[in-house]
Image (cartoon, rainbow, N blue to C red):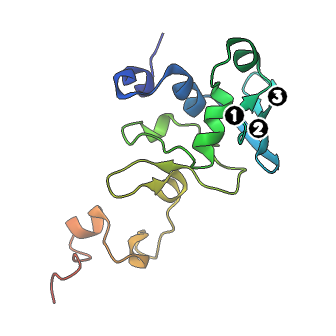
Amino acid sequence: MQTTSAERHESNDLEQRDARALTEYMTVLPLGGDVYSVTTQSGSEYRVDAREGRCTCPDHEYREVRCKHIRRIAFATGERPIPAWVDADEVDAQLGEHVEKTPKVAATDGGVTLEESATKDTDEDGCWCDDHDFPCFDCYKEGRRDLPGEGE
């Protein structure tokens, strides 16, 4: 059985349900307020009340745990940041796709959304950093842009 980076880093406080919430295919659709419909890769559909922390799945109802569906919504809406060490390639590409808020990755610089890191707008040179004060690493390394205050 192959393990994901999320499973390998359990010592970094990512529980198995967190890993499944991030890596399994799930569709989260807002139903109004803080209520969501979560459809899993197996085709099961559950209702989640994010405000009350309730879900209609058996894991939550019978084990009284914070299930992967509740955790998925917290990650998808940016309520809970994704740990920075989690491999973004292993995170479900649909995470946060149908909700108004955006997932966030925890980082020392205050975080960056998955959407920003995965789908940066590029300019004619193929780079997105012209719209920012700070150059991306590639532009700085290749001499296309200086750090703020350099070259003045």
Mark 1: give few (<14), some (14-19) or many (20+) Cα within 10 Å: some
Mark earlier in primary sequence (1, 3): 3
Mark 3: give few (<14), some (14-19) or many (20+) Cα within 10 Å: some
Nearer to us: label 3 or label 2 = 2
**Where's residue 152, x and y in %?**
16, 90
**Where's residue 26, x and y in %?**
69, 33
Instruction: Judge whether 112 appears above or below 7 on screen.
Output: below
Relative placement, left or right, of 59 versus 142 is right
Q: Residue at x 61, y 41 (%)?
A: 74
Q: Residue at x 41, y 36 (%)?
A: 86
Q: Residue furthest bottom?
A: 152
Q: Is residue 93 visible?
A: no
Amino acid type, residue under disc 1 in the picture: Gly
Q: Is residue 51 visible?
A: yes
Amino acid type, residue under disc 3 in the picture: Glu
Q: Which residue is mark 3?
A: 45
Mark 2: give few (<14), some (14-19) or many (20+) Cα within 10 Å: some
Q: Which residue is mark 2?
A: 49
Residue closest to the eye, 150 or 104: 104
Q: Residue at x 68, y 12 (%)?
A: 63
Relative placement, left or right, of 105 versus 147 is right
Q: Which residue is mark 1?
A: 53
**Where's residue 149, x and y in %?**
18, 83
Instruction: Judge whether 112 appears above or below 145 on screen.
Output: above
Amino acid type, residue under disc 2 in the picture: Asp
| Distance between the alpha carbons at the discs numbered 3 and 2 | 13 Å
Q: Are marks 1 and 2 in contact (CB under 8 Å)?
A: yes
